[in-house]
Image (cartoon, coloured by chain):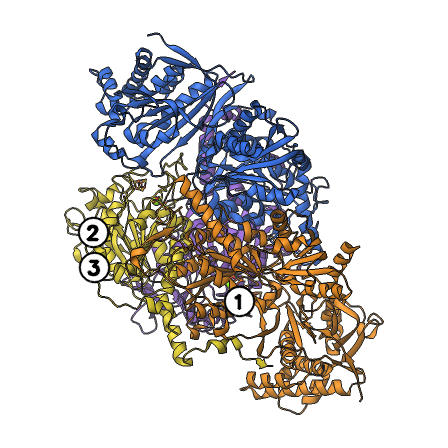
Chain colours: A yellow, B purple, C orange, D blue
Amino acid sequence: MKTLLDEILQTTQSVPAYEAKDFKPDVDVRWCAGCGAFSVLSPVQRFLPNLNLPKEKIVFISGIGCSGRFSYYVDTYGFHSIHGRPIAIATGLKIARPDLSVWIATGDGDCMSIGGNHMIHAARRNTDLNIMLFNNEVYSLTKGQASPTSHPGQITKSSPLGSLEDAFNPASLALGSGAPFVARGIDKDRQMMQDLFEKAAKHKGFAFMEIYTNCVIFNDGAFEEYTRKGIREDHTLMLEHGKPMLFGKEMDKGVRLDGYTPVVVNLRDGEYSENDVLVHNEKDSTLAFILANMTYHESLPRPIGVFLDLERPSYESRVEAQINAEIEKYGEPDFDGLLKGKSFWTV
Amino acid sequence: MKTLLDEILQTTQSVPAYEAKDFKPDVDVRWCAGCGAFSVLSPVQRFLPNLNLPKEKIVFISGIGCSGRFSYYVDTYGFHSIHGRPIAIATGLKIARPDLSVWIATGDGDCMSIGGNHMIHAARRNTDLNIMLFNNEVYSLTKGQASPTSHPGQITKSSPLGSLEDAFNPASLALGSGAPFVARGIDKDRQMMQDLFEKAAKHKGFAFMEIYTNCVIFNDGAFEEYTRKGIREDHTLMLEHGKPMLFGKEMDKGVRLDGYTPVVVNLRDGEYSENDVLVHNEKDSTLAFILANMTYHESLPRPIGVFLDLERPSYESRVEAQINAEIEKYGEPDFDGLLKGKSFWTV
Amino acid sequence: MPKFIRTVEDATIRFAGDSGDGMQLVGTQFSETAASTGIDVNTFPDYPSEIRAPEGTLYGVSAFQVHVGSKKVNTHGDVVDVLVAMNASSLKVNIPRLADKCIIIADMSGFDTRNLKLAGYEDNPLKSQDLSNFKVVAVDIEQEVKKLLKGSNIAPKVIKKTRNFFALGLTLWLFDRSQEHALRWLSRRFANEADILEANTRALQAGYDYAQNSSLLDFQYKIEHIGLEKGTYRNISGNEAVALALVAASQKSRLPLFLGSYPITPATDILQYISALKRYGIKHLQAEDEIAGICSAIGAAYGGNLAFTTTSGPGLSLKIEAIGLAVMTELPLVIINVQRAGPSTGLPTKPEQSDLLQAMYGRHGEAPLPVIAARSAADCFDSAYEGARLALKYMTPVIVLTDGYIAQGSEPWKVPLIAELPDITVKFHDDPATFQPYKRDPETLARMWAIPGMQGMEHRIGGLEKQDIKGNVSHDPLNHQKMTELRKAKIDGIASDIPDAKILGPDQGKLLVLGWGSTYGAIRNAADIMQNEGHQISHVHLRHLHPFPENLGTLMDRFEEVLVPEMNLGQLQIILQSRYLRKVEGLHKVQGNPFTASEIVEKISSMLH
Amino acid sequence: MPKFIRTVEDATIRFAGDSGDGMQLVGTQFSETAASTGIDVNTFPDYPSEIRAPEGTLYGVSAFQVHVGSKKVNTHGDVVDVLVAMNASSLKVNIPRLADKCIIIADMSGFDTRNLKLAGYEDNPLKSQDLSNFKVVAVDIEQEVKKLLKGSNIAPKVIKKTRNFFALGLTLWLFDRSQEHALRWLSRRFANEADILEANTRALQAGYDYAQNSSLLDFQYKIEHIGLEKGTYRNISGNEAVALALVAASQKSRLPLFLGSYPITPATDILQYISALKRYGIKHLQAEDEIAGICSAIGAAYGGNLAFTTTSGPGLSLKIEAIGLAVMTELPLVIINVQRAGPSTGLPTKPEQSDLLQAMYGRHGEAPLPVIAARSAADCFDSAYEGARLALKYMTPVIVLTDGYIAQGSEPWKVPLIAELPDITVKFHDDPATFQPYKRDPETLARMWAIPGMQGMEHRIGGLEKQDIKGNVSHDPLNHQKMTELRKAKIDGIASDIPDAKILGPDQGKLLVLGWGSTYGAIRNAADIMQNEGHQISHVHLRHLHPFPENLGTLMDRFEEVLVPEMNLGQLQIILQSRYLRKVEGLHKVQGNPFTASEIVEKISSMLH
Ligand SMILES: Cc1ncc(C[n+]2csc(CCOP(=O)(O)OP(=O)(O)O)c2C)c(N)n1
Ligand SMILES: Cc1ncc(C[n+]2csc(CCOP(=O)(O)OP(=O)(O)O)c2C)c(N)n1
Ligand code: SF4
Ligand code: SF4
Ligand SMILES: [Mg+2]
Ligand SMILES: [Mg+2]
């Protein structure tokens, strides 16, 4: 049952010692100056050498949107597909070719609006895909309409009187769909991004990364609270596995559960100490829901980092296992026999 | 700005005193004998008189599937649409016609598979729609393939070697999408179903009801644990707002939070009392996540009832409000003026 | 008692009963027996649209029709010569189908008061004059099997369930066929259920004996052997044939096979069939919707698989955008569309040929692709295989059209050895130095193919217009014109890679009947009749609908008139007229069921006079 | 200094600069001025496909072209007579468009070393012989405005931003147009930003004066007034016209308006425009995808609204299945498709006419519907309005085709009063006693319409085939044939409700140029030229593509040859040939940009010889 692919792909060459520049193709990057997407591209290019895979084994699949151009900007195999479908295409690719490392660059419109169905099913199915959701809370390529992550009241070209819809919370949606790995990153924090990509790559299964990316043209400053030095410390909660949930410029605030509702407590006035504060546990799915649910609450800091990192067998590995079990059971397949079936006769 | 609709629909007649039979149209119901769908139909017909609306103001919209036939079986306005799209169609109808009471009959394939995107967006958008998801954990009309709620290992015609996918938990997905009203019902419990429909009808906004419906042909017994007398008591947790979460034949077991993970405790051996047990609060969205997350955990009872019942302004009411505010601000519209625009000239 | 022998060329038998009566099963047994004992068969199952309609109702009738003959029968039969009616409803709904003198084998136990009422009969038709045109063989089968198995330990429920095998025995005798095949099947199927095995075996034998001894049945059909080519044969339905064709093409091309699909009647069988082939290393995805079905197949094709997607009308409509992507990226992809009656949900369980124009033209932008149609259940194999060959050779999506009639119907198929099948050689480009993603084979115009994992040929494809050869995104006006024309030329060029259209009958004459798809059988039979009557007519049946065979135009020119019977309102007609600028006559049937030969004969006759 | 007056019939001016240079703005000002001062205009914006490309690059050039004339100019101009080039790149990319002797107004400040390098110029072209075919007017506008505003309190950044208004002033003088319109606009726009207002106002004036005094500009264009009918006029783009047409149709039919849509270039404007009209009581939904866009519109139509959906190619492909549902349920629905270059993502910002066959045939099953195409920006109003009229009168979805060229281009439009528009009277059926959901108006064959909320007419519709008149689900074969034919007859019957095709030119002759959609302008101009030269040619431009006007066949018969120029590979050609069984010549341009008149003239000439 050796196929042509087994032949042409069998070379087990050693992996070259790449540098970031090896992943920079010889094309102009055509995002606007200052676009948050640049801040995703560069940590990607810097982390790829650590993947320890020959570059031809890496594929970037993107949809349509400013974010969709990503696949042109990494010197690997790439597929710039159609609006909303990169995850569906990647699903087929990964099942057919589990040997590849498959990355998806998608936008809040591409992934959460038109592509929502593929996103939730991929999360449930747990194919080993790495989703980079460039969330700029607006449709940029089409020049500034509301997206499913635009906030209520947001003025855009398609909501000139203010958006009337509540926003998706991508982390909650991913968790609600069954995603085993859910994280939130921020374009400005490149080191954190690079670490995040490495964690996602290590995770064998569906890895969902919402990345706040600033669109300087159509939604500039959307994430300023979480990125501007001096402000961000009071508005973000950087999640670290096993660490208490502290934040604030002096790390003197913490998040505590009141019943099952997260609240902010001040550690300075002595009422509460570090021991009262929640400790992050990436392996706890209920906690992940609680953390995700903190999003958009004015009084709570915005959690950033890995919400959940559970391992369960990826879909494509289950497929392989089922195939192998069957082959083990029935032996080398007899294709001529299959064609004949059970009820044949000869003339 | 009176439209033709204002004229033909203006009759403010009093509501006739209907009985259930007034909602039974003169057609044969073509579900298989014993199908769980019957057990949804009859409480619907019994509760409709309590809606206190003239029947012409009620619309049932369905997709394709055995469940899709529902719209033929209620003597109101009805639209048997296409596979996966009833929610999208209903969304337009409700925005255009907020005066109507709009109900959707959909299946686990129709709503959660092909229609998943419309489901999650409707939940987020919070249009006032009442979703009855007939979850029989299988595709029935097409004669028995796996659905997104089929459990791993389930043997179906399209998974003859056992399904390799994890199931959606509809309640978690709905919550993750932002649904303000999320509930789970069981076909066999008709009184509970009737109460549930009344609660959903009262809720002004998106109401999501997952209903376990037994398909006697393609997935018989799927919900036996939760329906068979003598067994169900130990496997279901009937949620009641403000009440402690007790279950079991003698109501001697309870659900308690260990950290933030729900566990079952026995109230008989004295270690725990009713006071240690969680108290249900339909208004708490974090608790709703925790409860939904209990689904599919072998060691935990399956929560049944209303998980969450929050009010926030429905989408169509926000649209109306924005329109009214604009009209208030600018006065009676001048359509000829609109056609002329601001930069016109005369010859 | 002594019986006549009635020698016939063909005959049609229809097994009809309630959904629970097991008619599909014994129909299949009958047809397998017939085929394996040397006569031709063609079958069609006819389910109710309800999953399980209430017992005994008119809309709960399930039927299975078998056409047998001493030469190729081509269709499942226009009219019924022998009807097995297990209850009153199954008689009533089938009356319009019966030939004069039709033999009605009726199970009297299905004509009790309750059943008669459900069927809307005031009086028992078996006892009235209503059926005087027919020959009624009324047997109380329930009584017979009860009698037979009285005293055994077998449960009454099981005994009642053997009625269908009694009926099978009866019909096997009537057609002078042995019980062997059915007996073998029973012992395989119920190896572990001795009582069921025994009950059915004895019922089968009893039915056979009953017929032999009955004075009501005074003759036996004799149908000569059809002189088949030597070889191995099996019965096959169109849906099975499609699945096997793709498996065979995957073996032949040595590419792994991938199916991305979403269930939809009447295409679901293919997905189900493939899903059971994991032991053959075959992968599939039951996707969340049709869009994901085709997109996952595109992903797998991008990864170097032979990828396909299966669907029916509404699903094809949903796949349209993604098909355009496959056209633009020039990836090989086989799209199987099992047509059903539309528009919209239409009559979902009924066949129609009304997706042809969509297959040809249903994409935004200029997005040409090959369109192929299968003419019969067995021909689904060759057509789908040809689809795979073209997809891989020309780097293009291909639409293969079948329909609910041939997809679910079956006929004997001479099973090929994979080694003997037409060549499908795939060569990935393996020289990084000369690789260019949109460089083309000068002969086929197919673009070069390199897949992820191949070193040194990293490149990017996508839905935006691409620069000729290099494959970069290009907005250059002349490049777009060139690429648009190249994509068209590539598909048009396939015309020289396909066989000429074959004419069945004289080379020239008064009338050419030109058909495509599942109308083959009815047209073939009609043409036979007319040709036998000496009329100057011929028949051409197209497999390749885009591009057309090169000789089609000249071929049409040799006939005064051209008739195109279609199960639509004239879709091939539109394409032919536009292409060949000549008037083509249409015969349009959109009734959710196939043409009969006589409908076509009638039309031909009216055109000849 | 004294100037010549150069009287011309028409001239084309192109404002080109970097994306940040405000070219779209001053282009619009120029065209509004021109139109409101009595000459005809036709405009087309030409954005880079990047949102904001790096400053000064070739692919960052943004342009706005205005064609002005003393008679209807019809297109945005084949070649450019006056180019405003704000930087080196904007000169370079536009050189191929320039007419001989074109006047190039170049801002020297955009030709510094950096800009030259970004444009790939070794030497400053303004100083070389490269431009000797043209007349270069090089002005250092930056210097000029700095000089002008020196000493004011205005920020240097603001001053620099006035360069475009200086250029506008210059061109206004060149075409002898007053500054009034621009001044009025400025004072409205910057009412609260005194410094910007002052800076721009003074720059405008300075540009005007500069031109007047410059020795480089030794003439002024004179363009006679176009003799327009009396009335109120405005400039309008095709997308605006579509939105207004639906608003007007909603007023006329007295039904609430509902738009369900998903953004896509180049159709998004319509959604955006509608979304600002809440004060007119208009509802819309920006849906999660195209499928939800059309489905929500179907829901609103079901609820008695005038519902429409807007999209472009890829979105149309996604809406196909739901369009079939609208056909089956016979609900009124207007589908606006702003065509762009395909297939797949194609050239998303460029126009093409390649969705015609999809609009005609792109649905599974037999699902006929009317197809209409708009010929110009202003004609988008009439076409979309006609779409609404047909949808409501015949209870059917209607596809209205426009394209990126006319959708974004603009021309003057005589604004109608809503009271004067063609009648659209909707009558819901209001008698429960006689109501039947599929009973038809004997004349139009439209089914009866009753909507939720109407008492006593509760009924159910859906995608399954329905029983004639009663509307129950029906699997009856003959009913399906009848309903299929009825749906077709209803649409075919519209032919008698639409005007005959109008012939522009002689009634008969050698050659008929037959067009549809946005090729109107170029064909019109080409036909004019050829007719003026005395050739026996005529022009017919179709609005109704399905069904065709009743006289089209006989009209074509009166010409020896028929030429169909299309921005595709011959889609109308296919339909015409099939329908009228005569050869039609095609002229196919798929380059992402419209025909020029001269391309068509050339083809006509070659056919005449
Ligand atoms: C089928 C289809 N529908 C719509 C579009 C138009 N479109 C292109 S990108 C886009 C949205 C982009 O938003 P997002 O995904 O947030 O990406 P961003 O540009 O913000 O990175 C839309 C609506 C399309 N190309 N195809
Ligand atoms: C576009 C489209 N795809 C597929 C189908 C086929 N189809 C009809 S119902 C159905 C699934 C039904 O499953 P579910 O929604 O769970 O309903 P059930 O029959 O179980 O009530 C499918 C796949 C269709 N009618 N249309
Ligand atoms: S428009 Fe926004 S998202 Fe797009 S490239 Fe520019 S800054 Fe980035
Ligand atoms: S097949 Fe199952 S779901 Fe469908 S009607 Fe029968 S019992 Fe109900
Ligand atoms: Mg975005
Ligand atoms: Mg189901």
What is the quadrant of residue D85 in the picture?
top left
Q: Say whether residue D253 is visible.
A: no
Above or below D73: residue B151: below
Q: CA distance from mark 3 to mark 2?
A: 13 Å
- Residue B98, x across and y down, in percent: 52, 42
Out of D364 and D106, give the one closest to the viewer: D106
Which residue in the protein does label 2 denote? A21
Same chain shared by disc 3 and disc 2 = yes
| Amino acid found under the numbered disc labelled 1 | Val
The disc placed on residue C242 is 1
Q: Which residue is at a point 49% across and 46% down the rendered structure image?
A: C366
Rendering quarter of residue C201: bottom right
Q: Is mark 1 within 8 Å of ligand 2?
A: no
Looking at the rendered structure, the secondary structure element under dot 3 is helix
Q: Nearer the viewer, residue A170 or C534?
A: C534
Residue under disc 1 on the same chain as residue under disc 2? no
Quadrant of the drawing holding the C terminus of chain C: bottom right
Q: Residue at x 53, y 70 (%)?
A: B218
First along the sequence among labels 3 and 2: 2
Q: Secondary structure at mark 2?
A: helix
Residue count near mark 1 (Cα–Cα under 10 Å), binned few <14, some 14–19, many ≥20? many
The chain containing the residue under callout 2 comes to A
Amino acid carrying label 3: it is: Asn
Whether C547 is drawn above or below A9: the answer is: above
Q: Amino acid at mark 2?
A: Lys
Judged from the image, the secondary structure of the residue bearing numbered disc 1 is: helix
